Every structure is written in structure tokens, then in C-alpha cells.
Amino acid sequence: MPQHRVKIHKVEVLSDDWYLLQKTTFEYLRSDGAWQTQTRETYDRGNGATILLYNRERRSVVLIRQFRFPTFGAGHDGFLIETAAGLLDRASPEERIKAEVEEETGYRVAEVRKVFEAFMSPGSVTERLYFFVAEYAPGERAGAGGGVAAEGEDIEVLELPLEEALRMVADGRIADGKTIMLLQYAQLHLLPPPRKASLAILIAGPYRSGTGDDPALMARNVAAMEAYALPLYEAGHMPLLGEWLALPLLALAGSTRVGDAVYERLFHAHATRLLGSCDAVLRVGGASAGADAMVAAARALGLAVFHKLDEIAGVAAQ
């Protein structure tokens, strides 16, 4: 058990003003079997909770801006854009964050959902942070927010499009760790980018399968896949066959026949790379290990996978 690897010898209180700062001397059993004496300073401010408010219709989020002196001392202007947050103060994370978000933003939310928890600075701070999300509506704003002046809070409330908030992460205007984590969670799980009306669709079906590498039969398989291209194009999509690009590339690379060393090195690798520029895969035809591999790779990338034309927006069944 982990506790058997730590023997605490001495705990000194260095400060007990704003929060508790302690210096601990302990022995640690290393993986090589040796005991090593170490000292660490830990800052105990209790556990906390934070929340991202989001609106699906507006694709927006509510954040706050407030002055953080430690960042001011580290060369920042001190005004951080953050998700609403607060210490638990012996309340449950759910109870505390509901009160905190109303106090700081003015929004009253009935339901919150915990998405994960994390130690934010485990090298020195004991705090465990509970992360929540909740939907908000303009009519749920019960007050102006702004925090509690007696506690030194002077909070500005911001409502931003998610895309703008993510740009602010990229250019450094948002530099708070908990906020970045929740914004990325929102991008992945709450407000994913709307699916484009026009999709780049890789048509995947049998090429060599069942042909015995007969060129005429392989050409027939390509033609069978190409039959899906025009309906996709006429519906506003961009159809692609890996063979359209891979076969000329193979010839340039020196391949002289299907299955030679150059072919084996490039053919499926090219199709997999092509998926990085696609939005979806249309799996057609019969058995094909290669086509099935494209489907698996597409799903791993989060791409849509279709099996019929009428599953795709704007395309009539054939």
C-alpha cells in the first residue's frame, strides 16, 4: 500500500494566516528499496469547485474577469479570465458551486453536472478541484453577480461565443488552467463544431479483395466505388477515392505491380493520411479488410461513417 512507503517524522507550521502553510520532513521508500529523507512545503487551502455555464442555442459560455495578485507578481497584468469557482468551506461541491456561480455571475442554475475532478498543483498545493458544467438561459440571471466586496472580490461577468473563448486560449488572453480544461471539455462534449453542410467523403470499398490481383477485376471494383461519386458531388459534397491519388503516387514511387514492396509501403498509408483531410467515410461494397481498416481509422478520428447514400444530407437513395 502507498502509505507504507511514507514515514512522517516532523510537521512544522510556517504560516497560518490566509491559509495553512506547513513544512513536512518524511522518509520515502524508493522503488529501488532505499529509504530517502525528503522535506516538502505544502499549502492547504481546502478543496474547491469550478463551473462552466454554457448555452447550446447561442453556443456561448459565461466567464468572469477578476484580479489575481499572485499572477500580477509573476509578470502578468493580474486580471485573469476564469470560470466561476470557490472553496467548499465544508459544503458539498454541488451545493457550493451553485451558490458560488450565482454570487459571481448572477446566474441561478438548478442543475449542475460534475464532469471530473483534479489536483491542480500537486507539487505544493493540497487542493482537489471539482469541475462542473451547467446550461444557462438569460432568464435565469437573478442578479448582477460581481462577487462579495467584503471578501475583496471585484468581478466582471463575460458572455462569450465558445469559438471566441477558444481563440483567447490560443492567443494567451485566457491563461487560467481550470478554465482552459473546461473550455476544451465544452468543445469536445457540449458544443462540438456544427457539422459542415458540404463534406469531404472518402468512398471505401473493395479494391483487391476477391480479384486475385487481376487488373480488370480491380478496375471493376474502382468503377463500382466511382458510381457513388457523382450523387455525392451533385448533393454538394466532395467525393474522394484513395485509388484516385494513391495509384499515380505509387507509379511515381516506382511500383511496378500490385503487392510489391512500394505498394505495400504506400497504398494503405496514403489512404490513412487522406482521412486527415476528410469529414466522413462512405463504406460500400462487399468484404474488404482495407476498407474496414479505413472505417476503424475514421471512427478513431471522430469522423462520420455512412453505409448508404440516403444517410448523407442531401443525397437521394440509389
Image (cartoon, grey):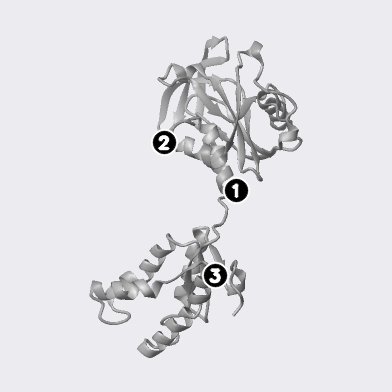
Judging from the image, what secondary structure is the residue with disc 2 in? loop
Instruction: Give yes or no for contact between labels 3 and 2 (Cβ–Cβ under 8 Å).
Output: no
Please name the residue that numbered disc 1 is placed on.
189
Q: Amino acid at mark 3?
A: Ala
Instruction: Give yes or no for contact between labels 1 and 2 (Cβ–Cβ under 8 Å).
Output: no
Tell me the crowding category of disc 1: few under 14, some 14 to 19, or many 20 or more residues within 10 angstroms, Cα based.
few
Q: Residue at x 40, y 20 (%)?
A: 75
The C terminus sits in image quarter: bottom right
Label 1 and label 3: CA atoms lie apart by 29 Å
Q: Nearer the viewer, mark 1 or mark 2?
A: 1
Q: Quadrant of residue 262?
A: bottom left
Can residue 52 be seen at all in this image of the molecule? Answer: yes
Please name the residue that numbered disc 3 is placed on.
235
Q: Residue at x 42, y 23 (%)?
A: 37
Q: Position of residue 222 (x, y in %)?
A: 43, 81
Looking at marks 1 and 2 on the same chain, the residue that comes earlier in the sequence is marked by 2
Q: Position of residue 252 (x, y in %)?
A: 24, 73
Judging from the image, what secondary structure is the residue with disc 1 in? helix
Q: Amino acid at mark 2?
A: Gly
Q: Residue at x 32, y 79 (%)?
A: 259
Looking at marks 1 and 3 on the same chain, the residue that comes earlier in the sequence is marked by 1
Depth check, front residue: 122 or 222: 222
Q: Nearer the viewer, mark 1 or mark 3?
A: 3
Report whether 294 appears left or right of 140.
Answer: left
